[in-house]
């Protein structure tokens, strides 16, 4: 681990400044985002071990220019003094091709001057890969010993160091931060029935994360055995309690995508018609932002050089505002919220969520459970899909525990596919727990692409949903 | 850079085997918002992935440790040597069973002819095909087009020396209908390896028809059980789920209790499935390990007949690898679409995403648009979900005679799932 901002990007900074200066003579707006993201992923299971680069490794540059009516971008990963003229020629070729479709005539980005460096190091002690592998082998063994029904245990960690630099006429920003994501996946079998359970979380302390994983391996293995008795729930409408993972899934998939304001520009979001209107019951408060919580999406500035923020989206059930990248904010005449994110320097920046959650309330979880005569408590995000214009829901919980007469009956169901209409669900929320958790291990696509790391979570919610 | 990496690996003590993959990507990307050009992008990048192998003996066992390096920028000789040292140290920690890397033959190369010499002109032409079919309240609100040329060069220490250049167009389009009562949209994504503007035009017209249907769709009056017709991408997802446990790594790691000779379909009235994998195109001839791809049948007449995947886990299972492929090929059925649609059914046009959990036997999803045939008339429906048992669905499965060819799926255009619960 480097423990510091990328030396490589520092060495390239003079050349990037030169590139920006030369392009400024051609274009009214020029910026460059330089990224050096690296790290490692280690996976150990019953039979094999792998060490590979972090799945989000990248190193390169993306230049954004404005040619009076449209923004264009050029992504590359080699810059030398000698090839700067070639880069400029490529950008000129890109912007000189006028095309047969009229441009949107976007406004010019206006940036306030800012020079700043940000550093957030891993808080734990250094761990060698040998030490991690040894720890994981013990974890695998610990998981296997839970039951003879355990077929395999896979433990995994991805540790990433992120260095990003943003340069423009007005801005000179650098950030360095780290994050670790451990995961466990357990397969169980009884006769012909095979089931699986998994868990994942994130923190800025590799050593502590691996300590926590030791406990999670055992609970996940026990769950995998328990799931051997699970059946899909009978389709129907139920009172449910969502655990923080499922609360986060609802916040993110069901509602969050709909307040990404690039969707407003495209006329793809129903939320646009609901600003300052009720979208949820009075006990619902929702936030997003790289500064709204400390988790996997807690950066200092976004991929467009906008500082991290903490945006209150829903206040007492009323939709107050959305989140925005720079270009969308410009077109809508609002301030960007630090949500302009790219899958990598190779891809376009879109409005993307960061740490998204429902805030804690005043209810006791035990009392929420006791208030249900027949329903389920839903656990563990499996997947979800957005429908920003029509507010359809599809959120899948890996499993649920049946509640009968205010207590868990012992029956477990899997999978639990929730569907319906977002506003119906949010309006049905009648209790929000005091306890609160952000799950810092998610990935989010826009449609079926553009994957970025996100966290979500919140309090436990009591709501009514369609399952099946 | 490839030469520099290979030379460094050959001269580095302790490196017993190696694999280097170079990927050069030239991508032209155009984004359209409400029928206007919003952003244009070019990506011109070259990345390398290097795998270092170290063979060693411990406790009388021979192990083959390996570690991967991502090289995303030019490196000095010193930087490269340090990275190889680190990878070698990592590889020495890995006690994986020994296996044989893919052996090379003669140097081979495949190159697909570029789809155009004028990328942005072509992308605008495609965008026009979509935009021109729209009207003021019935149009594509957002279109994203990616024209990508990807050249892969692969070398390993056992003589593999291969290259391929593949081209593709990826399209994401959002057809929208803004009526008096509401605004609705659908999500459409397509990929093409050849340029067929007429196919794109047909897709655009169908997408606009579908979104108009969503606008006119009504909720179902009541919950019921009904046959469901799945098509295209949803069918691919179902078939992919049916074979994913039969990859070499899944078998080696015990993801399933089933093995070659076992049936995945219970006896019933249904058509027996034959599912295989094949390369995505004629020029897509090798995988990331250098395995020359060969089409393989995984399920024949409902019975597992082979496994699939790349080199390492094939070697652990003592079989010849058929390669890492992602285009699913399925046998056509015996009934025409007309026959499949004769009895009452709901044809699923758009799902939020099909949910298939093989281990729980669950299939279902939230339906954004369907067409319900009640035995006499057909009308668009939305706002409901369907679910059912995969085992029961497969036992009574019906497949269409008519087939479709997509970049990732070749097979029946429709499948009929019997007696799904509709809520």
Image: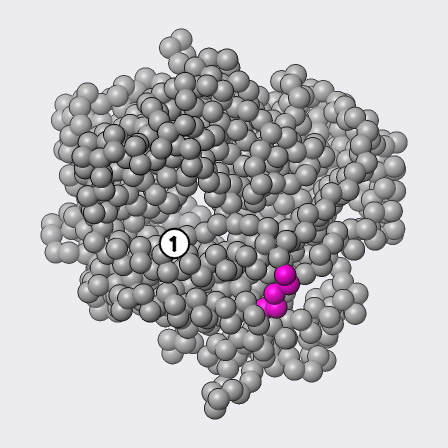
Q: Residue A342 at x, y = what percent?
A: 62, 40
Q: Residues within 10 Å of mark 1 (few under 14, many from 20)?
A: many
The residue sitting at 27% across, 59% down in the picture is A225
Verify whether residue B36 appears in magenta: no
State whether residue A447 is above or below residue B83.
above
The residue sitting at 41% across, 27% down in the picture is A362
The residue sitting at 39% across, 70% down in the picture is A141
Q: Residue furthest left?
A: B268
Nearer the observer, B32 or B129? B32
Query: In the image, which residues are magenta?
Result: A125-129
SS of the residue under disc 1: strand
Q: Residue A321 at x, y = what percent?
A: 55, 20
State whether residue A44 is above or below residue B361.
below
**Left of B284 or right of it: where is A175?**
right
Q: Residue B88 at x, y = what percent?
A: 64, 75
| Residue B230 in view | no
Which residue is under mark 1? A198
């Amino acid at each position: 681990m480097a423990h510091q901002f990328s030396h490589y990007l520092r060495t390239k900074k003079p050349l990037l400044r030169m590139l920006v200066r030369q392009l400024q003579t051609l274009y009214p707006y020029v910026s460059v985002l330089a990224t050096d993201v690296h790290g490692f992923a280690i996976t150990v299971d019953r039979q094999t071990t792998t060490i590979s680069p972090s799945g989000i490794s990248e190193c390169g540059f993306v230049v954004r220019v404005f040619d009076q009516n449209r923004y264009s971008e050029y992504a590359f990963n080699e810059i030398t003094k000698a090839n700067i003229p070639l880069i400029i020629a490529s950008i000129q070729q890109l912007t000189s091709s006028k095309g047969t479709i009229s441009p949107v005539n976007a406004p010019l980005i206006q940036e306030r001057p800012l020079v700043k460096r940000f550093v957030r190091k891993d808080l734990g002690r250094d761990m060698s890969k040998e030490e991690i592998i040894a720890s994981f082998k013990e974890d695998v063994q610990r998981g296997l010993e839970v039951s003879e029904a355990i077929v395999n245990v896979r433990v995994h960690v991805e540790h990433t160091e992120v260095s990003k630099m943003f340069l423009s006429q007005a801005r000179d920003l650098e950030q360095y931060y780290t994050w670790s994501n451990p995961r466990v996946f357990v397969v169980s079998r009884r006769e012909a029935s095979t089931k699986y359970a998994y868990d994942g979380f994130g923190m800025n302390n590799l050593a502590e994360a691996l300590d926590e994983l030791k406990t999670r391996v055992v609970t996940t293995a026990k769950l995998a055995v328990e799931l051997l008795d699970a059946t899909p729930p009978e389709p129907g409408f139920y009172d449910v309690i969502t655990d923080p993972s499922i609360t986060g899934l609802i916040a993110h998939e069901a509602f969050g995508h709909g307040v990404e304001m690039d969707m407003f520009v495209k006329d793809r979001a129903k939320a646009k018609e609901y600003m300052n209107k009720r979208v949820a019951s009075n006990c619902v408060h929702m936030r997003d932002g790289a500064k709204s919580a400390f988790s996997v999406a807690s950066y200092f500035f976004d991929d467009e050089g906008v500082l991290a923020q903490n945006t209150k989206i829903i206040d007492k059930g009323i939709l107050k505002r959305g989140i925005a990248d720079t270009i969308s904010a410009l077109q809508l005449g609002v301030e960007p919220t630090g949500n302009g994110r790219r899958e990598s320097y190779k891809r376009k920046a879109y409005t993307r969520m960061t740490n998204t959650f429902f805030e804690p309330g005043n209810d006791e979880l035990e009392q929420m459970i006791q208030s249900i005569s027949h329903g389920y408590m839903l656990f563990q995000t499996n997947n979800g899909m957005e429908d920003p214009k029509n507010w359809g829901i599809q959120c899948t919980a890996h499993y649920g525990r049946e509640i009968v007469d205010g207590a868990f009956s012992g029956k477990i169901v899997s999978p639990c596919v929730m569907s319906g209409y977002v506003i119906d669900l949010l309006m049905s929320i009648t209790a929000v727990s005091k306890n609160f958790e952000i799950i810092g291990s998610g990935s989010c696509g826009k449609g079926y692409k553009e994957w970025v790391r996100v966290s979500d979570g919140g309090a436990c919610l009591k709501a009514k949903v369609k399952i099946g | 850079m490839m030469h520099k990496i290979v030379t460094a690996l050959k001269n580095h003590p302790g490196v017993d085997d190696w694999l280097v993959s170079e990927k050069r990507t030239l991508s032209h990307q155009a984004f359209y918002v409400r029928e206007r050009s919003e952003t244009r992008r070019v990506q011109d990048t070259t990345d390398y992935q290097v795998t270092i192998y170290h063979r060693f003996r411990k406790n009388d066992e021979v192990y083959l440790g390996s570690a991967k390096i991502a090289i995303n920028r030019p490196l000095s000789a010193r930087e490269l040597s340090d990275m190889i040292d680190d990878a070698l140290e990592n590889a020495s920690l890995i006690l994986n069973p020994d296996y044989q890397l893919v052996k090379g033959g003669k140097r081979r190369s495949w190159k697909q002819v570029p789809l155009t010499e004028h990328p942005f002109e072509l992308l605008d032409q495609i965008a026009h095909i979509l935009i021109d079919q729209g009207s003021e309240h019935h149009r594509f609100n957002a279109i994203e087009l990616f024209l990508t040329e990807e050249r892969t060069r692969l070398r390993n220490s056992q003589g593999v020396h291969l290259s391929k250049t593949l081209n593709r167009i990826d399209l994401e389009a959002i057809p929208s209908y803004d009526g008096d009562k509401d605004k609705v949209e659908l999500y459409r994504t397509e990929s093409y390896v050849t340029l067929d503007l007429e196919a794109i035009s047909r897709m655009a017209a169908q997408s606009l028809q579908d979104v108009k249907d969503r606008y006119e769709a009504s909720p179902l009056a009541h919950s019921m059980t009904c046959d469901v017709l799945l098509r295209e991408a949803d069918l691919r997802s179902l078939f992919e789920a049916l074979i994913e446990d039969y990859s070499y790594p899944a078998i080696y790691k015990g993801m399933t209790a089933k093995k070659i000779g076992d049936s995945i379909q219970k006896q019933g009235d249904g058509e027996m499935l034959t599912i295989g994998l094949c390369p995505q195109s004629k020029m897509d001839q090798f995988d990331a390990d250098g395995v020359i791809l060969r089409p393989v049948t995984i399920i024949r007449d409902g019975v597992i007949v082979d496994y699939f995947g790349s080199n390492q886990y094939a070697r652990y299972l003592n079989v010849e690898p058929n390669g890492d492929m992602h285009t699913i090929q399925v046998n056509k059925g015996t009934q025409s679409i007309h026959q499949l649609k004769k009895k009452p059914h709901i044809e699923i046009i758009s799902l939020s995403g099909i949910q298939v959990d093989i281990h729980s036997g669950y299939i279902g999803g939230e339906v954004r648009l369907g067409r319900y045939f009640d035995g006499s008339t057909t009308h668009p429906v939305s706002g409901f979900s369907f679910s059912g048992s995969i085992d029961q669905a497969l036992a009574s499965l019906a497949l269409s005679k008519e087939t479709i060819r997509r970049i990732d799926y070749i097979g029946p255009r429709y499948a009929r799932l019997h007696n799904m619960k509709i809520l």
